[in-house]
Amino acid sequence: MADMILQVNHLSKSFGSHEVLRDIDFTVKKGDVTSIIGASGSGKSTLLRCINLLEIPTSGQILYHGQNVAARGVKAPEYRSHVGMVFQSFNLFNNMTVLENCIVGQVKVLKRSREEARQHALQYLEKVGMTPYINARPRQISGGQKQRVAIARALAMDPEVLLFDEPTSALDPEMVGEVLSVMRSLAQEGMTMLVVTHEMAFARDVSNHVVYMNQGVICEEGAPADLFGNPQKQETRDFLSRFRST
Amino acid sequence: MDKFSKLFADILKLWGKYGGSYLTGMRNTLVLALVGTVIGCIIGFVCGVLNTIPYTERDPLPKRIILKLVRVIVRVYVEVFRGTPMVLQAVFIYYGLPYFTDNAVKFTNIWLAAMIVVSINTGAYMAESVRGGIISIDPGQTEGAKAIGMTHVQTMLNVILPQALRNIMPQIGNNFIINVKDTSVMFIIGFPDFFAAHRAAVGASYLYFPSASVEMVGYLTMTLIASFLLRWVEKRLDGSSDYELVQTDQLTMTAGTYNHPNKGTPFDEHSLEYKEERRKRCGKGGR
Ligand SMILES: Nc1ncnc2c1ncn2[C@@H]1O[C@H](COP(=O)(O)OP(=O)(O)OP(=O)(O)O)[C@@H](O)[C@H]1O
Ligand SMILES: [Mg+2]
C-alpha cells in the first residue's frame, strides 16, 4: 500500500454537545481526485479542517503514511506542510505581494533559499496564469485571481495532497470558470486532491471518487458515474434531485 | 497692541538669556519621548504577543498554566501602570528603590530613571493596542499560514505582526505625542526637559507668561513636526498603490468580466457577510 496517503478511521468531531462528524472512514490514494458533496451543515468543512488538523478530532485516527497525526504530541505544522489547503475565503497574506505570498512558506517552513523559492513560486504562478500580477497585493486583484494565487501558494509547498474547501463558493459566477479550469488541469496532471464542492459538474466530470455526506456521516460514496447515475440511497437521490431542480 | 510688542520683547529677552537651555530642554524632551515610545512599543509588542498565544485543552497542563499566569501578570501590569499617574510612578520608582534597599540601589543616572518610567508607562498602553491590533487581523490569514505549515511564531512574525504594526501606527504616534507633552512631569525627579528649562528661566527672571508662551510654541512645534513625520511614515508603510503588470493574463476571458484591479475587492467584508449567511443557513440545516 505504498500509494496510500491518508487513511481516516472512525473519525468523530463534536463542538460541545453538537456531534458534527460521526464515525467517518475513508482513504485517499495517490492520484485520487475525491469530491465531497452534501448539504450545507453536513460537516464537509469540518471534515477537511480535521484532516488538516485545523480542528482537533474528538476521536478516531488520521493516518498519514501509516502514522496517526491526530495523536497527541504530533507536530501539526510539519504535517500540514505536506497537506495543502485552499480556502473558500482565499486567506492570502494581505501584507505581501502575490509573489511573496507564494515564497514565504517555502523559505520559512521548507527552508529553501530565496532564489530557489522564487523560481518555484514563479513556475506555479505561471501555471495558474497569475504571472502578470506577481507584484500586485491581494487587495488589488479580483476574487478569482486571489483564489488562483492561493492555489499557487499551496502548490509551491509541493504538497502530497491538496484540500479544497468550496474554492469557488465565494466567487462571482464569471470568475468560477477560471478557478475550476486550474483545478481541472491539476487533476489531469495527477495531483491528489480532496475537494469539497457544490459544483456538481466538477464532481462528476473531474473526480474519480465522490463522497456524499449527510448529517455528519458518509451516506454514500463511489465512482461519479455510479453515484450520479444510479444512487443507491434515498437521501442521495433527494439531494441530487434538489440540485437538478435548482 | 503694545501688550503684544511687550510680550515679544520679553520673549526675545528670555531667549537671549536662556535660549540655549530651552533648546537643550527640547532636545532632552524629544530624546526621552522617542526612547520611551520605542522601548514602550517593544514592551507592548512582547506583552501583546504573550497575551495572544493560543492554547487548547490538548496542550500539556504546564504550558496551559504558564500561559494563564503570563496573561494574569500582563493584565496586572497594564491595569496598574495605566491606572496611576505617570508623575506618581516616577516618584514611586525613583524614591522607592533606595527606600527599600536602604540606599544600596539608587538611580545615579536621572536619564535612566526617566526612560524606565516613560517606557513602562507607554508599554502598558501599547500592550492593549497591540493586542487589539493582533485580534483585528482576520483569522483567515492565520489559518492560511497554518495550512502551509507555519508555526505560531512564524505566523506572528511574518503575517500578523507586520499588519498589526501598520494598524496601530496611529496609536504609536498618539503615544509619542502624549509622551512629548507628558514627560514634562519628569521635572519632579529633576529631569532636565523642556518644562524644566521653563522653571529654571522663570525662577531667575520672573517672566512667567512670556516663558509659558515660549513653552506653548515649543511644544506645539515639536508635536506638529511629529504628526507630520508620522503621517509620512504611514504613507511609506502602505507602499505603492499601483503595481506593474508583467505580461497579460491568459486565463481571464474578456476585459470587464472581473473586478478591475484598481477597483479592489472588499474581500474581508464580503467573506464575513458570507460566513454570517452561511452560519444562519447551517443553523437551519443542522436541526
Ligand atoms: N467552530 C465551530 N463551533 C461550533 N459549531 C461548529 C463549528 N464549526 C462548525 N460547526 C457546526 O458544524 C456543523 C457542520 O459545519 P460545516 O461547516 O462542517 O458544514 P459544511 O458541510 O461545510 O456546510 P457548508 O456547505 O455550508 O460549508 C454546522 O452545524 C456548524 O454549525
Ligand atoms: Mg463548508
Image (cartoon, grey):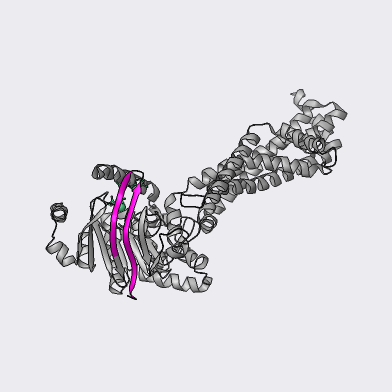
Residue A237 sits above or below residue A129 on the image: above
Asked if residue A3 lies in the magenta stretch, the reply is yes
The quarter in which the N terminus of chain B is drawn is top right
Image side of residue A158 versus residue A11, left or right = right
Image location (x, y in percent) of residue B141: 44, 54
Rendered image quadrant of residue A243:
bottom left
Q: Nearer the viewer, residue B165 or B223?
A: B165
Image side of residue B4 versus residue B151, left or right = right
Rendered image quadrant of residue B24:
top right
Q: How many marks?
A: 0
Asked if residue B204 lies in the magenta stretch, the reply is no
Q: Nearer the viewer, residue A37 or A187?
A: A37
Image side of residue A134 versus residue B78, left or right = left
Q: Is residue A140 visible?
A: yes
The quarter in which the C terminus of chain B is drawn is top left
Residue at the image point whose x is 22% and y is 63% from the top: A210
Image side of residue B284 versus residue B189, left or right = left
Q: Is residue B252 visible?
A: no
Residue at the image point whose x is 64% and y is 47% from the top: B43
Image location (x, y in percent) of residue A221: 21, 62
Q: Nearer the viewer, residue A211 or A118?
A: A211
Image location (x, y in percent) of residue B262: 40, 55
Principal secondary structure, stretch drawn in magenta:
strand
- Single out the residue that lies furthest toward the bottom: A2
Magenta stretch? A1-26
Image location (x, y in percent) of residue B100: 80, 36
